[in-house]
Image (spheres, grey):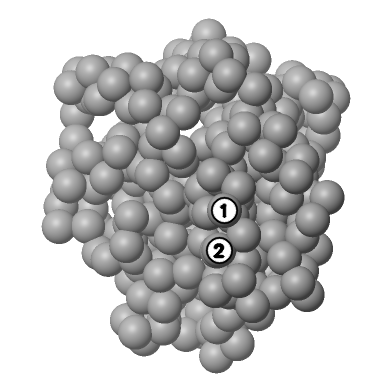
Amino acid sequence: MLAVVAPGQGSQTPGFLTPWLDADFASQLISEWSDAISLDIKRLGITADADEIKDTANAQPLIVAAGLLGAQALGLNKFSVVAGHSVGEITAAGISGVLSPAHALELVRQRGIAMAKAASQVETGMAAVLGGERTEVLKSIKDLDLVPANDNGAGQIVAAGSLAQIDKLIENPPTGSRVRALAVAGAFHTQYMQSAVSHVAGFVEKVSINEPTSQLLSNKDGSVAAGGKDAIDRIVNQIANPVRWDLCMESLVHLGVTGAIEFPPAGTLVGLLKRATPGIETFALKSPEDIAAAKEFAAKHGGA
């Protein structure tokens, strides 16, 4: 059984879109999408530096556009499960047919702008806690008035909250762990993002929502969305609530997934899957050179 997965913020690196834009169809698509959301995705993906693509309002549309481009280039019509991490849920909604690519990009543009605005109100951030005993890690996060904003499984939990408290966590990591600050602009998936939820909720009322063509997993609890509207409602509320990627990976196992392809910018989720679900084969679609091998991988796991 084949699953396709889409990464979230932090997966982008300077110039990562360059190899994808050599194809005429890709360059044309990116130009159309850029015009539709008034954002130069091509420049962001090719020449923008790390600081510019760290900006939430730039990063989120760039990541979703890359994932949708990879999906179109691969051209799969058959896969059983789709899941995205954080903003990758919007990519997943586009891949599964819940949203058209155009509406997915319009939604992520609004999400990115709203979250950037919310992040500018208070100095907040996020840090990944790697390793350590889970109970102790969660206690340390709570004791510092931080939130476990991303529970990524495989011994990785991302804490979010005020920068002052994040600094304290970095200075005094839980026993057996190391803590690394993340290149994001705010405390995403916490109460600091509540104003963004309100903004995006108003925007989605204008968007056409369809039923998913495959099982679409939710970051809320790893469950399969009950339908298109349920999926979008969950995506909106997830802006200010923790991402339970650990539960999404458990669901992949329970559903019987045997292989997973990660769309660009690929690598992060494949790494987590390899550590947490070694029984699931993985494939990172990083460039057009990977397309032929990705199609073979998909066919091996029942995709087409």
The residue under the point 30% across, 38% down is 237
**SS label for mark 2:** helix
What's the mark number on residue 281? none
Asked if one can make out residue 115 in the rendered structure from this viewpoint, the answer is yes
- Badge 2 vs badge 1, beta-carbon distance below 8 Å: yes
Q: Is residue 230 left or right of residue 185?
A: left
**SS label for mark 1:** helix
Residue 297 vertical placement versus 99 (above, below):
below
Q: Is residue 182 left or right of residue 56?
A: right
Mark 2 belongs to which amino acid?
Answer: Lys
The quarter of the rendered structure image containing the C terminus is bottom left
Please give the residue where the numbered disc 2 appears in the rendered image: 139
Mark 1 belongs to which amino acid?
Answer: Asp
Which residue lies most toward the bottom here? Answer: 279
Q: Is residue 120 left or right of residue 243?
A: right
Residue 178 vertical placement versus 189 (above, below):
below
Question: Which of these two is toward me, 302 or 222?
Answer: 222
Please give the residue where the numbered disc 1 appears in the rendered image: 143
Which residue lies most toward the front here? Answer: 143
